[in-house]
Image (cartoon, rainbow, N blue to C red):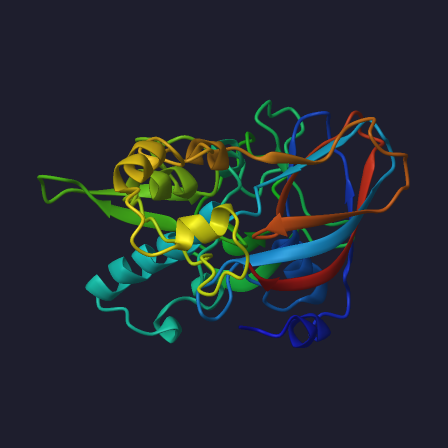
Amino acid sequence: MESRADFMASYSHTRLVYNALSNKPHYVDLTKGLLLMNQKGCEQFSSGDKPHIVTCSVRLSNADNEIRVAKNTWVVRNACVKAAAAWRRTLRSAGIYRKKQLNTYARYPRFAYDENHSKVWLETDSSNALGVDIIPVGADTSYDTGVFTADGDEIKVIAANSSPDSTTPWSAQFVRSLTQTTFAVPQSGSTDVLDKKANLLGDASATYSNIVAEYIDSRINDAEIEDTDLDESPSNDNDFVMMLAPGEEVADDVLDNVDDEGKWRPYALSTAKSDAIALEATANVAGQATTIHAPLGMMKWTPSATTDRLIVDVVAISEM
């Protein structure tokens, strides 16, 4: 496991400030923010393909804002681990066995928060009803590469596209600075393969791979009964002594009692497909610091107006 102290020591700029662009949901990827502000790589996954969780202190300029994150549970963690393993398996089937065979900034999976985030990936158009994908204040929105297309146009790398619906859509000339991982999913009963953008949350989809939902669907539930709490040397003549006494014929009663006790899982796995409120609107005071744990470093911030601000101090990055 990576040392969180060593990992964070490599980032000198850990305060990320975000300006609201509308009152629509704003998708915030803290690993992307650290990458842009420190001008060095920061991934959603560790070198061992384990999902990162970002611990941060957040403050809002407006108490009416809300922040949501994925649930920090074993279901979300295992979904990320299994998704990364499945992605590596497909890479190996194509002859890609080492990370160095991949492009520098695509050697680890990078997922969108949900399908709406996928649809506005690196886009900051405030009129988009699905939400906006934002970067920190002070980060460069683009840079010229000095490399030209076959048509003679200089390639521009864009971290935040302020006009995705304009006459200059994503193209050979205008490319995304970070790409969302695409899964090549073999189709059952055929030789066809379907390319699906990978998202963390959402229900199972025919066009997207929403990994928590896919993990739940792939999981085989095994029921195991294990009792390790029996005392081998009871000292008092009480109910426990009688229950532990050898030779007592209680088999029929035991079977009757345990037949329906603890038989069903008390929670629904499907709830892991949705996010949870990390900071509820009107439940805090403007400027108040609140600690948040964000799986994969992703949050969904819903401001009230374009004057709202989100200030994030990243405290630690560790494996879930």
Nearest the eye: 255 or 84: 255
- 183 vs 76, left or right, is left
Q: Is residue 271 above or below residue 48?
A: above
User: Who's the residue at 48% across and 50% down the image?
Assistant: 240
Q: Is residue 255 above or below residue 89?
A: above
Q: What is the quadrant of residue 160 in the picture?
A: top right
Q: Is residue 172 visible?
A: no
Q: What is the quadrant of residue 18 in the picture?
A: top right
Question: In what quadrant of the picture does the C terminus appear?
Answer: bottom right
User: Who's the residue at 59% across and 67% down the image?
Assistant: 41
Nearest the eye: 222 or 168: 222
- 199 vs 191, left or right, is right
**Number of numbered markers:** 0
User: Who's the residue at 36% across and 40% down the image?
Assistant: 216
What x and y, as percent, mark residue 208?
37, 36
- 52 vs 316, left or right, is left
Q: Is residue 171 above or below residue 277?
A: below
What x and y, as percent, mark residue 296?
56, 52
Most distant residue in the front direction: 237
Q: What is the quadrant of residue 106 in the picture?
A: bottom left
What x and y, as percent, mark residue 220?
27, 44
Q: Is residue 152 above or below residue 112?
A: below
Q: Is residue 270 visible?
A: yes
User: Who's the residue at 47% across and 35% down the image?
Assistant: 273
Nearest the eye: 125 or 257: 257
